[in-house]
């Protein structure tokens, strides 16, 4: 088994291992450390010695042993936890369960005792498998700050009961769960940093988890909307990069490469969800993605419909990013100057997306000098290497 294949498998199994270890032993904070050590051991051994017969069981067993070692060390340092360590030592490893505890882990990470920021950070770490440094970059905070935030979050949930919440509590946590899944998907769809535009394992994991949530809540319109949004967005992935991983903007993509089956699934999901009642932001974004997915070309896109959908979205979620996307839709209907008028005062000065949109609109309006400066500003603000190359390339053309 190659190192890359091993890495992909370990990323997929990591949340299941953590969920199983926490369910069996508790001690969320130390369990996470034990799982990380087990994953590291597997990444070294499996490419050399071959894949074990039951990789998930292997990881759970090794992580449990590491957890026992960590508890022993902790016990030596703090004798008051001696009773806990004895419990773990006495626990029989027993058979490895077939159940996937990832969803329980997901709801635990979104526990109401945590702040929204901590819920997202802990989920990205424990379920999404992002490093602390990657999460810190996503939140635009120093890595040390994020490490402390995740550490506090782990201590808060360390002694919480590892179980699926009841119906009422589950509904309360659902919004946080969906938001976290949305962020994990976005990080996979467009990585905030690094050499690759896409982190397929992350977006695939977000889609898998959202499918699990939908099986649990099949009548929830926003769950269906989020799944539709992810599927429709991911359908464009094969056309988003060219040779060498170069960024290809949507208007220039070869639409024959889009995943037609995924688009059909997404359109069916959102078509079923929209008539049910109250429409939420994920359903509206999915509807917008469906319009893009069904357009035979960039020129034939129904931009007036997209603009109208964004205006509905603005009434329930008036955020700077939604306003930025609305401005793009307006520019496609009324021209680049109309779009520019809407982006000038957006509070996104440190966000490369604002300057990339400004650059495109200025270029479309004939302001080559302004567009050149805006492309370079956007390139300086993004930490994604493919996006930097794309933005520098656009600037050099002017």
Image: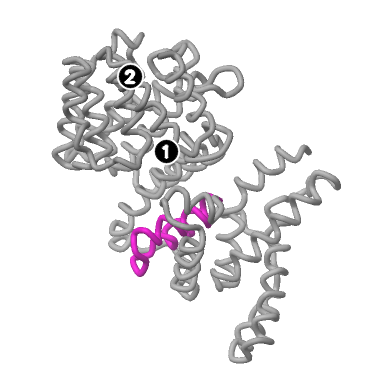
Instruction: Tell me the number on the disc at residue 70.
Output: none
Left or right for 71, reference 164: right
Q: Please, what secondary structure does the residue beneath circle 2 have?
A: helix
Kindly identify the residue that appears in the image at 68 percent across and 67 percent down: 64
Q: Nearer the viewer, residue 394 or 102?
A: 394
Write the start and end of the magenta stretch as one range.
102-129
Q: Residue at x 46, y 63 (%)?
A: 145
Q: Which mark is residue 381?
A: 1
Is residue 123 part of the magenta span, yes or no? yes
Is 106 placed above or below 193 here? below
Tell me which secondary structure the magenta stretch mostly adopts.
Answer: helix
Q: Is residue 363 left or right of residue 91?
A: left
Q: Residues within 10 Å of mark 1 (few under 14, many from 20)?
A: some
Residue 334 rendering spot, x and y as whole percentages? 16, 15
Q: Is residue 267 left or right of residue 107?
A: left
Question: In the image, residue 34 lies at what x, y percent?
Answer: 66, 65
Q: Is residue 343 left or right of residue 187?
A: left
Position of the C terminus by quadrant: top left
**Is the C-beta separation of discs 1 and 2 under 8 Å?**
no
Residue tagged 2: 369
Front position in the image: 316 or 231: 316
Alpha-carbon span between mark 1 and mark 2: 19 Å
Q: Which residue shows up at 51% across the image and 63% down it? A: 144
Single out the residue that lies furthest toward the front. Answer: 369
Tell me if I can see residue 90 in this picture. Answer: no
Q: Which quarter of the rendered picture does the N terminus lie within?
A: top right
């Amino acid at each position: 088994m190659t190192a890359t294949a091993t890495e992909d498998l370990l990323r997929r199994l990591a949340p299941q291992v953590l969920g199983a270890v926490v369910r069996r032993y508790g001690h969320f904070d130390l369990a996470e450390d034990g799982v990380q050590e087990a994953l590291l051991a597997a990444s070294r051994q499996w490419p050399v010695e071959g894949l074990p017969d039951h990789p998930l069981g292997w990881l759970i067993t090794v992580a449990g042993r590491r957890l026992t070692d960590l508890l022993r060390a902790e016990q030596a340092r703090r004798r008051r936890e001696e009773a806990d360590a004895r419990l773990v030592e006495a626990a029989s490893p027993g058979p490895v369960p077939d159940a996937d505890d990832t969803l329980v882990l997901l709801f635990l990470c979104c526990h109401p005792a945590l702040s929204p920021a901590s819920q997202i950070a802990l989920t990205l770490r424990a379920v999404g498998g992002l490093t602390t440094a990657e999460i810190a970059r996503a939140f635009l905070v120093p890595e040390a700050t994020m490490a402390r935030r995740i550490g506090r979050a782990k201590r808060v949930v360390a002694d919480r009961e590892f179980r699926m919440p009841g119906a009422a509590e589950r509904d309360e946590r659902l919004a946080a769960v969906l938001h976290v899944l949305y962020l994990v998907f976005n990080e996979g769809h467009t990585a905030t940093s690094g050499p690759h535009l896409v982190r397929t394992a992350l977006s695939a994991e977000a889609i898998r988890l959202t499918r699990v949530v939908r099986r649990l809540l099949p009548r929830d319109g926003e769950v269906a909307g989020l799944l539709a949004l992810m599927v429709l967005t991911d359908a464009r992935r094969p056309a988003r990069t060219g040779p060498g991983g170069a960024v290809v903007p949507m208007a220039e993509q070869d639409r024959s490469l889009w995943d037609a089956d995924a688009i059909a699934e997404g359109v069916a999901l959102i078509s079923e969800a929209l008539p049910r009642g109250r429409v939420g932001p994920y359903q509206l974004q999915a509807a917008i993605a469906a319009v893009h997915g069904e357009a035979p070309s960039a020129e034939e896109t129904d931009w007036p419909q997209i603009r109208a959908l964004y205006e509905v979205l603005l009434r329930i979620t008036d955020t700077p990013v939604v306003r930025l996307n609305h401005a793009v839709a307006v520019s496609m209907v009324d021209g680049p100057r109309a779009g520019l008028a809407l982006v000038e005062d957006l509070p996104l000065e440190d966000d490369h997306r604002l300057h990339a949109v400004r650059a495109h609109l200025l270029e479309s309006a004939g302001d080559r000098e302004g567009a050149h400066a805006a492309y370079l500003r956007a390139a300086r603000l993004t930490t994604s290497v493919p996006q930097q190359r794309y933005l520098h390339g656009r600037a050099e053309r002017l």
